[in-house]
């Protein structure tokens, strides 16, 4: 990482990372520390809100879907406690409606997983006038479609018939898609 980018962080390098995927959280924490941030990790909405209330950070990376609720609840607390906090919302299920909701309540940016530390750093440090550069390795269209189908399938409690109905898809077609590995 270049010296100039390290200085862009500013004096307050506090960073809250909220994600229930523990291996990802640990990797991201180490990567952000190497980029000059001082990360503090939380594995749930409750823990994220507690840290945001006690020690509001200058930066935050919050997963949208957590086991105990919605990451947007953490974003709301961050906005209340520290309005200048730069927040990036991460999700494995990219959806326009959710992106709009995240930005409306104060997220700086919205990235789909798998987002790497460089994409996240660019989004956190981008000024409001400039857009961060596009990701180096964005999800393929096939992968986005697969992620959407998986999300609807999970929301329908893994009921194939109900998922097929909601996606306006034939049940057997859906079963074939679900039987395959995820595309890259």
Image (cartoon, grey):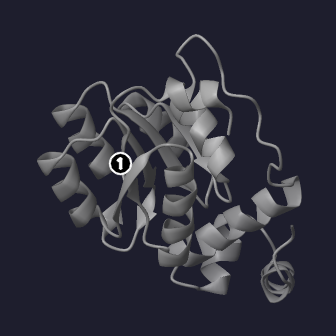
Left or right, 129 with respect to 53, comes to right
Work out whether residue 95 can be spotted: no
Say which quarter of the image contains residue 152: bottom right
Q: Residue furthest front?
A: 3
Work out whether residue 174 can be spotted: yes
- Up the image or down, 49 lies above or below 12; here it is below
Q: Residue furthest left?
A: 54
Label 1 crowding class (10 Å Cα cut-off): few <14, some 14-19, many 20+? many
Left or right, 116 with respect to 60, comes to right
Q: Position of residue 114 (x, y in %)?
A: 68, 59
- Up the image or down, 103 lies above or below 119; here it is above
Q: Residue furthest top?
A: 129
Q: Position of residue 21 (x, y in %)?
A: 49, 74
Q: Position of residue 161 (x, y in %)?
A: 66, 83
- Image quadrant holding the N terminus, namely top right
Could you say which is closer to the camera, residue 35 or residue 77?
A: 35
Could you say which is closer to the camera, residue 48 or residue 39?
A: 39
Give the residue pinned by disc 1.
Answer: 72
- Image quadrant holding the C terminus, namely bottom right
The residue sitting at 52% across, 34% down in the picture is: 124
Label 1 secondary element: helix
The residue sitting at 22% across, 41% down in the picture is: 56
């Amino acid at each position: 990482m270049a010296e100039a980018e390290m200085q862009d962080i500013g004096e307050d390098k506090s960073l809250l990372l909220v994600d229930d995927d523990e291996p990802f959280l640990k990797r991201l924490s180490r990567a952000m520390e190497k980029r000059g941030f001082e990360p503090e990790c939380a594995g749930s909405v409750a823990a994220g809100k507690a840290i945001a209330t006690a020690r509001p950070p200058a930066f935050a990376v919050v997963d949208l879907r957590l086991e105990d609720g919605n990451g947007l609840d953490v974003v709301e607390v961050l906005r209340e406690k520290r309005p200048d906090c730069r927040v990036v919302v991460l999700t494995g299920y990219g959806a326009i409606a959710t992106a709009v909701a995240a930005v409306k309540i104060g997220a700086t940016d919205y990235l789909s997983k798998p987002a790497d530390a460089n994409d996240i750093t660019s989004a956190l440090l981008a000024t409001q006038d400039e857009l961060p550069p596009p990701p180096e390795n964005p999800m393929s269209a096939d992968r986005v479609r697969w992620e959407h189908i998986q999300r609807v399938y999970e929301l329908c409690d893994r009921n194939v018939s109900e998922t097929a109905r909601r996606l306006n898809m034939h049940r057997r077609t859906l079963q074939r898609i679900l039987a395959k590995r995820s595309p890259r």
